[in-house]
Image (cartoon, rainbow, N blue to C red):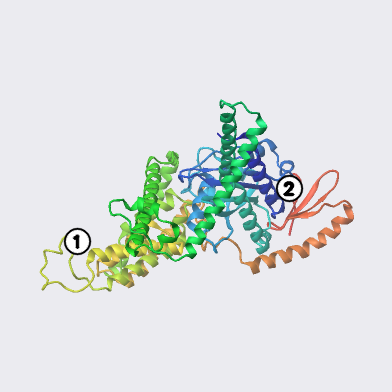
Amino acid sequence: TESPHLAREDEDLLSRAIADAGLHAFGAIFVELWVASSDGLTVTRPSGGHWMNPSFMQSVSCPEKAKEVNERAPNCAPGESLAGTLFKESYRWGGRVMGNRKVYWRQLKSLIDDPFIQHGNDKRMPQIHDLGIGLVATVPFSLQGRNGIVLFMSRSTACIERLRAPENERYLISATDLIGAAFAIRIPRRHCAKIRSDLFRSAVEKVKRELRSKKPRNVADVALEVADRRREDRFSFLERIEDDREEQNTPQCPPQIASKTSFGSQMSKIPDAWKQALSPCEAFAQNATDAIRCFASYVSTKLKKSIRKYRGAGVLAPPRHSLFESITIFAGVFLVMLALVGFNQCLGVLEPEFTYEGAWYASSICIIFALTAAPVGQPRQVFLAHTWCILVGFIFQQIPTGGFETMFDINKIPKVERVSGLPLTWKQAFSTAFGISGQAYLGIIHPPASSLAFIFASERTWKFKNLLPILGGDVIMVIMSMIILNLGEDTQYPMYWIGLSWKSRSAQRSDERTSCVKFRKLWLNGKKQHPSTSSLNGAVGMQNSTNSLELSLDSRKWRSGDGDCLLEL
């Protein structure tokens, strides 16, 4: 059982490290530590692993809600809720690899709108966003076999240029290392405390045995005798070390070992200085046995963890669409598919080979209308994924098809009749694998496009010139979907076109420079009217007895304390 005093010390150490990181990080409102369990099934926030800016409680309209969000954080599976999603993404980004330490920024609004993200039963992600938190920085770490992440949450109106400054990001990485060390030290310290406790218990038991002996003696004599025995044991240990050194310096031959004894007993009887003189075969056998034992233990541990994951993470399935939304989806899909089929028929009349299959767009239309906010259905994904997969399929189409048509014809075709080349089944598998893995690497994943690599690699009737009508169909599908979906109040398509996460640094510097020039004029005018001014910390405020004004460099608007826009720059 864990000592309450030791657990309290661990929690205090971690709390101090996280509080120091949050106080010195720019724009940090919440700082949280999330650690994966030993079996990798859950992500947990340990005791003392959270911090909230004290001044944030005074700036929100509902302090009780902010306090509840800070104190209540249930465990989640990797890929579930805010912490599980960012933990899984950090594992995919490879942020724990030495030399690849980075700070990964995500917008909370994009995570909430992503239908492929499991929000969990606690709905903690929307609650954090309702408090005005819009940006989350994820810094992964791996120390002493413990993997985890540290989340630094900031307001939506925080200055992105300052948040992503190299000095601030280096501090976040260093603070994460300190927080990870404060957590990873728990298990080794508990082991050391247990060893010290066992040694103390053994010493007490030895004293008790001496006291229970037949010959009566006082406690002082027993304590002196115990100290003498420890001193003798230490001296005998030093003498054995000196004897081993003398034997190592004295060249001798290993003794003749009887063949009746086992190899393990032989090794136990041989001094350390003679073990190197054994035959190379015996040394190789011992090393190979150790390596096989370690590998078997590693495989067994991996299999046990994998089997535990078969039962699932207990995440709820996504909700169904309402009847009105289903009717809207039906009408939109019908109109778009009708336009695509009609466009294909017109192309067939002009040029029979300059066509495509209308069935290729069925899955794409399903994603766009049923999962409108999904990243895989945005225009950039559609155009680039189709282009990439057609290019991959066309390249594999140029490879000669030979050998055997199926995997079971290798023994049926005579060797004389076999044609040199790559079997068709291999071409189909290779093209699909390259198409999907290439989409993942380039960040242009669109699942329906993966079938084009298979189709173009299998049939020579499809040429590279078919890329143009397919892209034309993409244009029709995107434009019609954009018109139909944007008629609704709650839907918007597309979510992005190019998909860049942040503005370029030059554009940010230009905007900030313009804002600072205009702000200086307003500041000088406001300083005359309001002599008492507060300090600048991400946003500049001027306070008086009745209300306060603040300037947000991100939105470039003057806002009053009640949120009304007074002046836009």
Q: Is residue 408 left or right of residue 5?
A: left
Q: Position of residue 33 (x, y in %)?
A: 59, 47
Residue at image position (30%, 70%) is 396
Residue named by callout 1: 407
Q: Position of residue 217 (x, y in %)?
A: 63, 28
Is residue 104 at least partly visible in the picture? yes
Question: From the viewer's perspective, is residue 463 above or below residue 216?
Answer: below
**Crowd band around label 1 with a 10 angstrom C-alpha radius: few (<14), some (14–19), many (20+):** few
Quadrant, the C terminus? bottom right
Label 2 with label 1: CB-CB less than 8 Å = no
Picture quarter containing residue 203? top right
Which residue occupies the foreground of this view, 241 or 112? 241
Q: Position of residue 374 (x, y in %)?
A: 47, 52
Which residue occupies the foreground of this view, 384 or 536? 536
Question: From the viewer's perspective, is residue 523 above or below residue 509?
Answer: above
Question: From the viewer's perspective, is residue 557 above or below residue 80?
Answer: below
Residue named by callout 2: 564
Q: Is residue 286 left or right of residue 213?
A: left
